[in-house]
Image: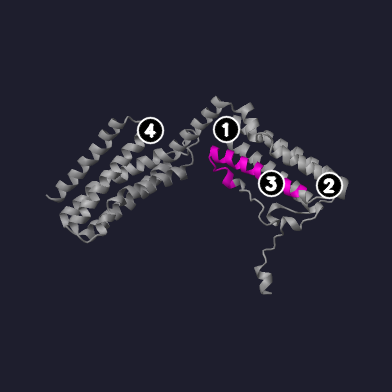
Amino acid sequence: MFSRLLRSGKRSLESLGEQEILALAISSEEDDGRIYLAYADALRDAYPNSARIFEEMAEEESHHRQMLIDRHIERFGDRIPLVRREHVRDFPERKPDWLIRNMPLDTIREQAEAMEEAAHRFYLTAAARTQDAPTRKLLGDLALAEKSHESLAHRLGEEHTPVDVKAEEDQTARRQFVLTYVQPGLAGLMDGSVSTLAPIFAAAFATQDTWQTFLVGLSASVGAGISMGFTEAAHDDGKLSGRGSPVKRGLASGIMTALGGLGHALPYLISNFMLATTIAVFVVFIELWAIAFIQNRYMETPFFRAVMQVVLGGSLVLAAGVLIGNA
């Protein structure tokens, strides 16, 4: 009984007979075709050229599947055993549709390449284990089809997504990343880093108590994070503005807001007031320069202007907090 519990229930590819190998190939081609169609559906609105590529790849998989079915009928009849990739050990898994929809364009392209390479290796292994000459030839031909001089994704890409179109789609993907994650995250980081400076340092210099200062910073950071997150999520649903999921934007904004405040609140867990304050001030300037860098890198704000806006503004807020705390 103990050995039965340890058994995975999956079979090795070497244990499959010729009929089971054909059945596995049929189901795999069907699954891959559906995945390519899911890619096409996910990309159609933003990347129509790439969507067309995956539609043609799905057609290619459908053709392969029909060839395999025809061979199975000739060899074993029309009753195809139920053998799927999840029944076989070490067979590459595929992501479900709800994960596919959240993949960026480059990841989808990489996944398609990996799928073709895995199919090529499977057909080579399957052909080596097949004794029937016509079946062996079919599996070998399919291996060549999956691994031709260039992958199907590349060959179709040359037709539908030449260099200029691919560059345009990459730019669209980058813009979507900026709108959905960078822009709300940056706004949150700026708000969390700058808006909490005055209350944290005012509390620090007014009380000279590191623990009380930490509690003020923690409450201010978490409160600001929750507020910014809900505000961003409720701002718009992203459908008309094209800014993407409100949940993703809200999480990006809320988390970065909280992190921006916690960065200079955490040093006050140190009991030595002067050491904690020195570290907190150092962290503040790192945060402000990081914000300026992100603005310059992703928002294309001139670096000098970003420095003037963020570092100078943050320094003034920090100074205001210190002055208020010492009043």
In the rendered structure, which segment of residues is drawn in magenta?
Answer: 98-127
Separation (CA) of disc 3 from disc 4: 44 Å
The amino acid marked with disc number 1 is Asp
Q: Which residue is mark 3?
A: 121
Q: Most extreme residue toward the front, as rendered?
A: 128
Q: Earlier in the sequence, mark 3 or mark 4?
A: 3
Q: Vertical placement of 236 versus 22: above or below?
A: above
Measured as percent of width and height from the top left, residue 311 is found at: 25, 38
**Which label lies toward us, 4 or 2?**
2
Q: In terms of sequence position, does the residue under pointer 1 or pointer 4 come before the other?
A: 1
Residue 322 in sight = yes
233 lies left or right of 75? left
Q: Amino acid at mark 4?
A: Met
Task: Say which of 2 and 39 sits in front.
Answer: 2
Q: Nearer the viewer, mark 1 or mark 3?
A: 3
Quick check: marks 1 and 2 in contact, CB under 8 Å?
Answer: no
Going from N to C along the chain, the mark reached first, 3 or 2, is 2
Q: Earlier in the sequence, mark 4 or mark 2?
A: 2
Q: Can residue 196 be seen at all in this image of the molecule?
A: no
Q: Which residue is mark 2?
A: 72
Crowd rating for badge 1 (residues with CA inside 10 Å; few <14, some 14–19, many 20+): few
Q: Nearer the viewer, mark 3 or mark 4?
A: 3
**Secondary element type, mark 3:** helix
Residue identified by numbered label 1: 45
Relative image position of residue 229 (x, y in whole percent) = 39, 46
Give the camera-side residue of 25 and 78: 25
Q: Which residue is mark 4?
A: 299
- Disc 1 and disc 3: Cα gap in Å? 33 Å
Tell me which colouring the rendered structure shows: one colour
Secondary structure of the magenta portion, mostly?
A: helix
Task: State the residue in front, 240 or 113.
Answer: 113
